[in-house]
Amino acid sequence: MALKIRLTKVGSVHQPLYRVVVAEARSRRDGAAVENLGTYTPKTKGNPINIDLARVDYWLSKGATPTETMHAMIKKARKAAAATA
């Protein structure tokens, strides 16, 4: 079972809201997820990314691969966490 860390859309048409999830690679975009890792709200000011980095590290150690978009978002979240710490 190949797992991916990716976005799934839950918002309405003009109010986008995405969940960061771990899901099977062959499942549909809004299908069942293994675990919810956080949210991404693109219209908010400041830090729109809210991700549990400890759980991301756990799933990466188990072999889950992030999509290109999620790879970039995880890097941004790590930089933001390092700046606040």
Image (tube, rainbow, N blue to C red):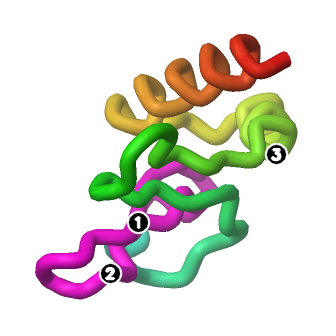
Of labels 3 and 2, the one closer to you: 2
Residue holding disc 3: 55
Q: In the picture, residue 22 is in which quadrant?
A: bottom right
Which residue lies under the disc numbered 1? 18
Q: Position of residue 73 (x, y in %)?
A: 46, 32
Residue drawn at (67%, 67%), measured in percent from left and top?
36
Q: Residues within 10 Å of mark 3 (few under 14, many from 20)?
A: some
x and y percentages locating residue 70 in the rendered image = 44, 37
Give the mark nearer the N terminus: 2 vs 1.
2
Residue numbers of the magenta segment:
1-26
Residue for point 63% across, 58% down: 38
Q: Nearer the viewer, residue 50 or 2?
A: 50
- Under mark 3, the amino acid is Arg
Left or right, 27 with reference to 35: left
**Front residue (pair 4, 57):** 57
> For the view shown, which residue lies furthest in the left direction?
14
Instruction: Give the percent coordinates (x, y) of residue 66.
Output: 50, 36
Which one is in front, 72 or 3?
Answer: 72
